[in-house]
């Protein structure tokens, strides 16, 4: 577990030093991939997807 945390910290430091925007592009690419995966899940099982999203938003709302 600590190796994972150390690797994550070193990756974040590398992204902070990167001033050319590749880190931002990688982050945006990851967001696009997540949105596409969620879209496919919604097309396959819309009822289950809606239920999961509602549970997530209920949990987030309970924090505030």
Image (cartoon, grey):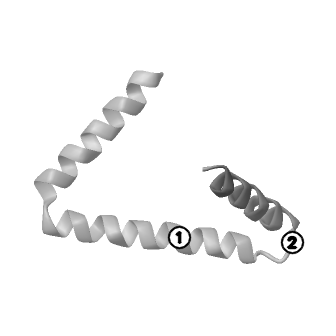
Image location (x, y in percent) of residue 62: 39, 23
Q: Is residue 57 above or below residue 25?
A: above
Disc number for residue 10: none
Q: Where does the image place residue 64, in percent across and percent down from the top left?
A: 48, 22
Q: Which mark is residue 30?
A: 1
At 66% from the left and 75% from the top, the residue drawn is 25
Closer to the chain start, of discs 1 and 2, is 2
10 Å crowding of disc 1: few (<14), some (14-19), many (20+): few
Would you say the residues marked 1 and 2 are in contact, meaning their CB atoms lie under 8 Å apart?
Answer: no
Looking at the picture, how far across and down is residue 9, in whole percent?
75, 55
**Disc 2 marks which residue?**
19
**Secondary structure state at the residue bearing disc 1:** helix
In the image, is 10 to the left or to the right of 38?
right
Instruction: Examine the rendered structure and indicate whether residue 56 appears above or below residue 48.
Output: above
- In this rendering, would 6 be left or right of 27? right
Q: How many callouts does the rendering have?
A: 2
Q: Secondary structure at mark 2?
A: loop
User: What's the residue at 11%, 52% (across, down)?
Assistant: 47
Crowd class of label 2 (few under 14; some 14 to 19; many from 20; radius 10 Å): few
Locate residue 33: give its quadrant.
Answer: bottom left
Quadrant assignment, res 26: bottom right
Q: Considering depth in this image, is 62 or 9 the residue closer to the camera?
A: 9
- The span from disc 1 to disc 2 (Cα, nearest Å) is 19 Å
47, above or below 27, in the image: above
Residue at horizontal 88 percent and vertical 66 percent from the top = 17
Q: Position of residue 4 (x, y in %)?
A: 63, 56
């Amino acid at each position: 577990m600590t190796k994972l945390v150390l690797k994550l910290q070193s990756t974040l430091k590398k992204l902070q030093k990167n001033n050319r925007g590749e880190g931002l592009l990688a982050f945006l690419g990851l967001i696009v991939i997540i949105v596409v995966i969620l879209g496919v899940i919604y097309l396959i099982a819309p009822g289950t997807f809606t239920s999961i999203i509602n549970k997530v938003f209920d949990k987030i709302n309970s924090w505030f």
